[in-house]
Image (cartoon, rainbow, N blue to C red):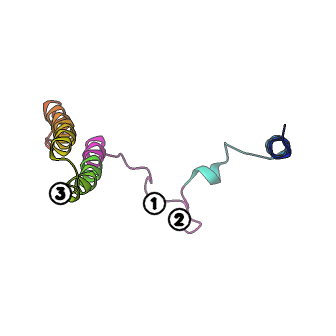
Amino acid sequence: MSVMTILIMIFIFISNIFMLISMLISKKSFLDREKCSPFECGFDPKSIARIPFSLHFFLITMIFLIFDVEIALIFPIIATFKMVNFTMWFKISFFFISILLMGLYHEWNQNMLNWSN
């Protein structure tokens, strides 16, 4: 074995030993009331900090994020139109856009785009 491999193995071993020691001697309190409650200037909170979150709003946000990233991926396809072979460009573009349209169709069938559920 080379010297570099031996040094890497020694560093990994030493770091694992330090992590194990820190886990054993650390004092953790998972049931501490003060750490579990929200902080509001040292006073008890006036209302519940954990309000219910709309799952539908979260799913709409995820759909927006996915389509936003897909738009960012379409820009290079448009920019490379004149630099590559047209048939290969057309096949790749058609495949990519068909995957996007299938995803949109699936979301439409699952009623994910209807806000009034």
Q: Which residue occupies 30% across, 41% down?
A: 55
Query: How far is disc 1 from disc 2 in space, using C-alphas?
Result: 9 Å
Q: Which residue occupies 17% across, 33% down?
A: 102
The residue to which callout 1 is attached is 46
Circle nearer the N terminus (1, 3): 1
Q: Residue 34, image x and y in percent?
A: 64, 54
Image side of residue 44 versus residue 81, left or right:
right
Q: Over which residues does the magenta segment extend? A: 38-63
- Specify the amino acid type for callout 1: Lys
Circle nearer the N terminus (3, 2): 2
On-image quarter of the N terminus: top right
State yes or no: residue 28 in magenta: no
Q: Which residue occupies 27% across, 56% down?
A: 72
Tags 1 and 3 in contact by the CB under 8 Å rule?
no
Q: Residue 19, image x and y in percent?
A: 79, 44
Tags 3 and 2 in contact by the CB under 8 Å rule?
no
- Specify the amino acid type for callout 2: Glu
The residue to which callout 3 is attached is 82
Query: How far is disc 1 from disc 3 in space, using C-alphas?
Result: 62 Å
Which mark's residue is nearer the viewer, 3 or 2?
3
Circle nearer the N terminus (1, 2): 2
Q: Which mark is residue 63?
A: none
Q: Which mark is residue 40?
A: 2
- Specify the amino acid type for callout 3: Lys
